Image (cartoon, grey):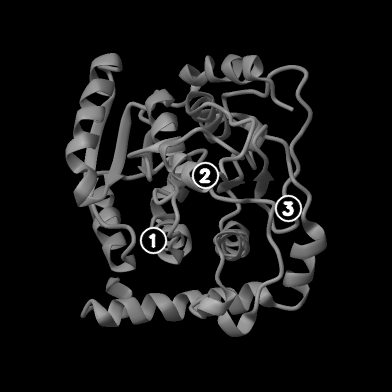
């Protein structure tokens, strides 16, 4: 377990990172993503906000600018529940940047109506489209905040999970997390210099989690949102979660974190590796990862058609 003091010790060494770090945060308008955003010291940060949350997020970024005057914050307005909106994010960054060092995606919905688009189709599209910029960075990293390590059996016949008979809050979360891990493994395999972390942060006292109070389903022993943010920065910068060594060395006393058989880091709330090879190895052996990827590309193409653009311009 990475104790909080150890995490803070590591984060204190972030100044050793190469100059000109560029980071993109999607889902940083509230919850874990917002807290991670306010702790990362990257000099140039892009943050994506839904049109309805732009005003509040502008105020938050203005506050961060005062506390971190050397940083530049760029706000991108996009509805990430629409896969076709991902091109707005990609275009805004590729027009100005030659590399992308850190991509952090967390589920902004957090509430009672989780979306497969915000949890899976949109984030994977963003990673795929931003691979050229990520590969141009010296130590690129992608952080997915969902339910890494909790992958379970899924039906290849209903990957879009549209049948309400198969839907429940937890089933939807696990389904999206499973598809996310399989696709992230595929992308990591084709991009060996890219470090990918799929994080299950556990129970965190976010505004989204508070929505469960009226159902008496709020989990006990919640971690503070601030601590979750500090740990998010640790995952995004420490060599503990890197496929190649970098400047933020692993603090003394911490053991190594293992990658999944597919080459990504599946970690729990404390930053420890989760071994779920009993499930994932079977998926790879049966080619489920390829089925998931083929399905995903089909959905992207359908979204492009509805948006009136050819597939390669999604």
CA gap, disc 2 to disc 1?
16 Å
Q: Is residue 63 above or below residue 313?
A: above
Q: Are marks 1 and 3 in contact (CB under 8 Å)?
A: no
- The mark that comes first in sequence, 1 or 3, is 1
Q: Secondary structure at mark 1?
A: helix
Residue at (27% x, 18% y) in the render:
70
Q: Picture coordinates of residue 265 (x, y %)?
A: 66, 46
Number of marks drawn: 3
- Neighbours of disc 3 within 10 Å: few (<14), some (14-19), many (20+): many
- Residue 310 shows in this picture: no
Decide which of 245, 306 is in the foreground and name it.
306
Residue 292, compared with residue 186, is above or below; it is below
Residue 293 visible, this angle: yes
Dot 1 surroundings within 10 Å: few (below 14), some, or many (20 or more)? some
Which structural element holds mark 3?
loop
The location of residue 33, given as percent across then percent down, is: 42, 38
Q: Residue at x 36, y 42 (%)?
A: 24
Q: Earlier in the sequence, mark 2 or mark 1?
A: 1
Q: Quadrant of the N terminus?
A: top right
Q: Are marks 3 and 2 in contact (CB under 8 Å)?
A: no
Circle 1 residue: 129
Foreground mark, 1 or 3, reads: 3
Tell me: residue 310, above or below residue 125.
Answer: below
Q: Is residue 227 left or right of residue 132?
A: right
Alpha carbon of mark 1 to alpha carbon of mark 3: how far? 23 Å
Residue wearing tag 3: 260
What is the quadrant of residue 222 in the picture?
top right
Determine which residue is flagged by label 2.
143
Q: Position of residue 115 (x, y in %)?
A: 43, 63
- Quick one: quadrant of the C terminus? bottom left
Residue at 44% x, 44% y: name it: 211
Where is residue 216 shown, x and y percent of the image? 55, 44
């Amino acid at each position: 377990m990475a104790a909080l003091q150890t995490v803070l010790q590591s984060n204190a060494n972030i100044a050793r990172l190469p100059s000109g770090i560029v980071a993109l945060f999607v889902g940083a308008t509230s919850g874990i993503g917002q807290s991670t955003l306010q702790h990362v010291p990257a000099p140039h940060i892009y943050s994506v906000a839904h049109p309805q949350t732009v005003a509040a997020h502008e105020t938050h970024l203005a506050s961060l600018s005062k506390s971190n005057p050397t940083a530049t914050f760029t706000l991108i307005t996009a509805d990430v529940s629409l896969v076709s909106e991902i091109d707005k994010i990609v275009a805004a960054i590729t027009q100005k940047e030659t590399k992308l060092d850190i991509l952090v995606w967390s589920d902004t919905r957090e509430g009672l109506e989780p979306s497969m688009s915000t949890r899976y189709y949109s984030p994977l599209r963003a990673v795929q489209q931003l691979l050229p910029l990520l590969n141009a960075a010296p130590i690129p990293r992608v952080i997915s905040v969902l339910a890494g390590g909790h992958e379970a059996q899924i039906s290849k016949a209903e990957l879009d999970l549209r049948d309400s008979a198969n839907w429940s809050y937890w089933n939807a979360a696990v389904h999206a997390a499973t598809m996310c891990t399989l696709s992230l493994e595929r992308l990591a395999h084709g991009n060996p210099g890219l470090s990918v972390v799929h994080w299950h942060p556990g129970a965190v006292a976010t505004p989204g989690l508070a929505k469960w109070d009226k159902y008496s389903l709020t989990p006990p022993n919640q971690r503070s949102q601030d601590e979750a943010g500090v740990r998010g920065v640790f995952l995004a910068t420490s060599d503990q979660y890197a496929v190649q060594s970098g400047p933020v060395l692993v603090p003394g006393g911490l053991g190594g974190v293992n990658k999944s058989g597919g080459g990504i880091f599946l970690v729990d709330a404390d930053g420890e590796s989760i071994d779920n090879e009993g499930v994932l190895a079977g998926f790879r052996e049966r080619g489920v990862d390829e089925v998931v990827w083929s399905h995903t590309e089909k959905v992207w193409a359908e979204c492009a058609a509805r948006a009136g653009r050819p597939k390669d311009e999604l």
